[in-house]
Image (tube, rainbow, N blue to C red):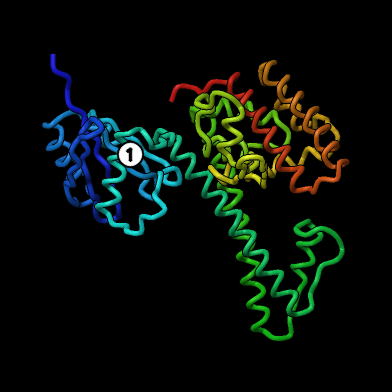
Amino acid sequence: MQMQKVLYVGLDVHKVSISATVAEGGRDGDINYVGAIPNTPLAVSKLAKGLAKRGRLEFCYEAGAFGYGLYRQLTSLGHGCAVVATSMIPRKPGDRIKTDRRDSQRLAVLHRSGDLTRVWVPDEQHEAMRDLTRSRIDAVMHLMRARQQLFAFLLRHGRSYAAGKHWTQRHRSWLAGQTFDQPTHQIVFQDYLEAVWSAQDRRDQLAGRITAEIPQWSMGPLVEALRALRGLDYSSASTFVAAIGDLGRFENPRQLMAYVGLVPSEQSSGDRIRRGGITKTGNGEARRMLIEAAWSYRYPPRVAKEKAEIIVRLPKPVRDIAWKAQLRLCRRYRALSAAGKRPTVVVAAIARELAGFIWAIGQEVMPAAP
């Protein structure tokens, strides 16, 4: 029985058009540029239907702003499809010509040789939760900018609050009592202040929506389990899980640490060994959540009242991992600080080990069926 020919199709996807190249199986298989088609579901279906007459199709395209709609369409038609990491595509240093045709040809050839790195493709519900957590992050950044603009305006007019922390009840009362001689300045102040309150309401509403959606999410049990760790709450745990996805695809904790860019970089050759700062590769949202959580381990280990009410509902293996993490990371923080390490270096080291404990909890708590 003759084996079906395999065709590797590289797609260079743009907003309006998609450039396609077909590389036939085998080391010396022919490479043919199909051309550019409109970036519409109908045009993609026609392309796949025409190529399917020649053999089995294996598509690939770069991950980017166009999401996973093309992947879902091609897989629903029964074809193979890989969404590949753009930063991991091999490139020749001397290649100074870049066109859509060349990009699609390179993708097809590298896909045929197996030199492309696939990214994990979430289901539609997971992708929706990822967008929801990202919108909360955008709201937080908007709130920070609004507060900074308000403080800059007050500073220009010699108004500075020195009676304690900002955004307490006392500080809000102080803001409410600010008056200006010029009516225009009063209008500007009220506009900046209203922008702060609006941004704060938006952030709180999105955080409430995340909390309400977690029980219906397939990753909800994992989010609940991660809340047992110090420094992680609903927002940070859901943001981390939405960004990373299924922890089961990491064979060991070192892979997760490298994925979030918390391992040291290195440039070694011969007898020379040179290690630098963390790589900062992978998902920046997940890395930021770990860094923020790591700061909480500078205090002695203990379980707060609010955290105890969460932990008591979790399985014993998860509780044991969370307490072990707190004992080790608090001790590790004190030891590194006593050794004279900079606070940022200490926090990065704690965040790296925290990723290992998160991986361990991920092995105990499996996601629910989507």
Q: Is residue 52 left or right of residue 349?
A: left
Q: Residue furthest top?
A: 1
Viewer-side residue, 56 vs 303: 56
Residue 173, horizontal then vertical, whole percent:
78, 63
> Residue 187: image x %, image y %?
63, 78
Q: Residue furthest bottom?
A: 182
Q: Quadrant of residue 107?
A: top left
Q: Quadrant of residue 89?
A: top left
Work out which quarter of the rendered image holds the C terminus and state it. Answer: top left
In the image, residue 344 lies at what x, y percent? 74, 48
Q: Which residue, as the protein is rendered here, is positioned at the far front?
A: 271
Q: Residues within 10 Å of mark 1 (few under 14, many from 20)?
A: some
Q: Amino acid at mark 1?
A: Leu
At 83% from the left and 30% from the top, the residue drawn is 302
In the foreground, 4 or 38: 4
Tell me if 46 is positioned left or right of 146 in this view.
left
Q: Quadrant of the N terminus?
A: top left
The residue closer to the viewer here, 165 or 182, is: 165
Question: Residue 46 or 4: which is nearer the viewer?
Answer: 4
Left or right, residue 200 beside residue 68: right
The residue where tag 1 is placed is 110
Question: Residue 279: where, in percent of width, then height?
Answer: 60, 45
Secondary structure category for the residue under label 1 = helix
Residue drawn at (44%, 39%), measured in percent from left and top?
127
Left/right of residue 297 with respect to residue 233 in the rendered view: right
